[in-house]
């Protein structure tokens, strides 16, 4: 079972346990040396740059951790795309998804009953623990979109609902990458591939065919039945806030729970949970509980459930400070920048175009040998 502690000291300890060399060799395997930092990066507790700098202090060089840095850069890349195109990430971004038969979710996916044993185990783990190995996420998306013929949008929201590390840009654009709307081709994996990376010996499934057959396959009967999920997010009720209107107010949210942000400032600190955001992008109770546990790392942080405008008006806030994020465009006040691995920003049509410039800059920051 994967554990995600929420104390800041435990999170720092998890960073210090990273082995970038082992990660490079084993990351695609079920028991690979992945960092399990994604929930903390997605919730804004730590940044990709913070992780990189801590590894530099530990003596890792660019050559020993290049693959790990590249994977961190994927998170910055998806966020930069979101910054650049905004709500367009909710639509087919580069091309239309082809060969669609429905806009729902295969029922067997939601029920963890596809007949692919390790996939069903991965889905059950997602619902129970709020986490799924990245390689398994690709398998699930491929089964849903490219064999089940489902449009990616609803299934992507289904997965996001459960993920403790749910980052809508990373999630939606990764599903689009698999479905071929944000890449030059669709991603497929057969049973042999799944068996290799997840140590299975299962045979005689609908995936147990050569790739050339997989590309031309009709929707398997195991994926024919679909459902339209009905998600709801239960948010905490707002308790009475103790706000000093003469002080600046820092606004934290689902994507920013950084305990080091302006830590020494004498300010009001408010975690804003906006119902409209969670109507657009619902998350599970487990995700909200995770956030409410992480917020305990921030001194005197108070929770407000309601809109930004309600918070501002009700408590007569004058000076408001928040961190940049695509979901914060309706906020008013002073916008602090986020911390990125590099200064490279803007829209790049592919990750590797983005990485080309990021890598060049990082090689000036990270010791070569």
Image (cartoon, rainbow, N blue to C red):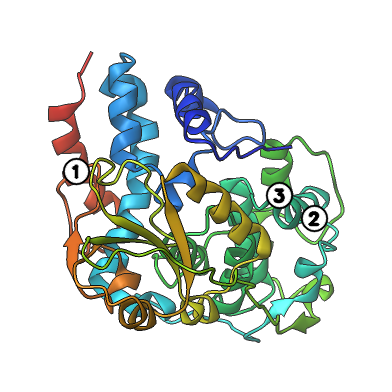
Location of residue 220 (image quadrant): bottom right
- Residue 307 is situated, as x and y percent measured from the top left of the image, at 41, 80
Residue 323 in sight in this render: no
The tag earlier along the polypeptide, 3 or 2, is 2
Using a 10 Å C-alpha cutoff, classify the residue at mark 2 as few (fewer than 14 neighbours), some (14 to 19) or many (20 or more). some
Local packing at callout 3 (Cα closer than 10 Å; few below 14, some 14-19, many 20+) is some
Q: Residue at x 83, y 50 (%)?
A: 117
Residue 30 lies, in percent from the top left, at 67, 36
Q: Are marks 3 and 2 in contact (CB under 8 Å)?
A: no
Q: Residues within 10 Å of mark 1 (few under 14, many from 20)?
A: some
Indicate the secondary structure of the residue bearing disc 3.
helix
> Considering depth in this image, is 129 or 82 the residue closer to the camera?
129
Rendered residue at 24%/49% (across/down): 266
Q: Which residue lies at the image location 60% right of the left edge and 30% below the top edge? A: 32
Position of residue 265 relative to residue 322, above or below, is above
Q: Is residue 38 above or below residue 309?
A: above
Q: Give the image quarter of residue 72.
A: top left
Q: Nearer the viewer, mark 1 or mark 3?
A: 3
The residue labelled by disc 3 is 129
Report which residue position mark 2 lands on. 120
- The residue that mark 1 highlights is 342
Left or right: 317 with respect to 102? left
Depth order, front residue of 195/271: 271
Quadrant position of the C terminus in the picture: top left
Of the pair 14 and 264, the residue shown nearer to us: 264
Cα distance between the residues tagged 1 and 3: 32 Å
Look at the numbered discs 1 and 3 and tell me whether their residues touch, using CB distance below 8 Å.
no
Res. 76 in view: yes
Residue at image location 53% in from the left, 36% down from the top: 7
Q: Quadrant of the N terminus?
A: top right
Residue 316 falls left or right of residue 46: left
């Amino acid at each position: 079972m994967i554990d995600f502690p929420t104390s800041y000291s435990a999170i720092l300890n998890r960073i210090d346990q990273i082995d970038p060399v082992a990660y490079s060799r084993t990351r695609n395997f079920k028991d690979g040396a992945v960092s399990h930092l994604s929930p903390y990066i997605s919730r804004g507790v730590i940044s990709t740059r913070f992780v990189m700098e801590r590894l530099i202090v530990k003596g890792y060089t660019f050559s020993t951790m290049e693959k790990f840095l590249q994977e961190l850069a994927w998170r910055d890349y998806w966020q930069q795309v979101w910054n650049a195109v905004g709500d367009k990430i909710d639509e087919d971004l580069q091309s239309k998804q082809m060969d669609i038969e429905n806009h729902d979710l295969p029922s067997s996916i939601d029920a963890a009953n596809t007949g692919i044993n390790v996939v069903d185990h991965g889905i059950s783990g997602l619902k129970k623990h709020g986490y799924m190995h990245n390689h398994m996420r690709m398998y699930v998306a491929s089964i849903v979109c490219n064999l089940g013929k489902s449009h990616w949008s609803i299934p992507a929201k289904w997965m996001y609902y459960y993920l403790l590390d749910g980052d809508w840009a990373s999630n939606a654009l990764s599903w689009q990458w698999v479905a071929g709307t944000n890449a030059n081709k669709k991603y497929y994996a057969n049973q042999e591939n799944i068996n290799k990376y997840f140590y299975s010996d299962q045979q005689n499934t609908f995936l147990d065919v050569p790739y050339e057959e997989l590309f031309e396959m009709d929707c398997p009967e195991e994926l024919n039945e679909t459902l339209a999920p009905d998600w709801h997010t239960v948010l905490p009720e707002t308790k009475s806030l103790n706000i000093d209107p003469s002080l600046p107010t820092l606004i934290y949210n689902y994507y920013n729970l950084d305990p080091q942000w302006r830590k020494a400032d004498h300010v009001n600190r408010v975690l804003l949970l906006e119902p409209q955001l969670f109507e657009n992008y619902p998350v599970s109770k487990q995700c909200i509980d995770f956030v409410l546990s992480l917020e305990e790392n921030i001194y005197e942080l108070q929770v407000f459930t309601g809109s930004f405008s309600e918070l501002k008006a009700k408590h007569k806030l004058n000076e408001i400070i928040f961190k940049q994020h695509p979901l914060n465009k309706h906020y008013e006040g002073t916008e602090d920048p986020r911390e990125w691995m590099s200064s490279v920003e803007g829209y790049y049509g592919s990750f590797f175009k983005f990485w080309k410039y990021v890598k060049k800059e990082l090689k000036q920051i990270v010791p070569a040998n």
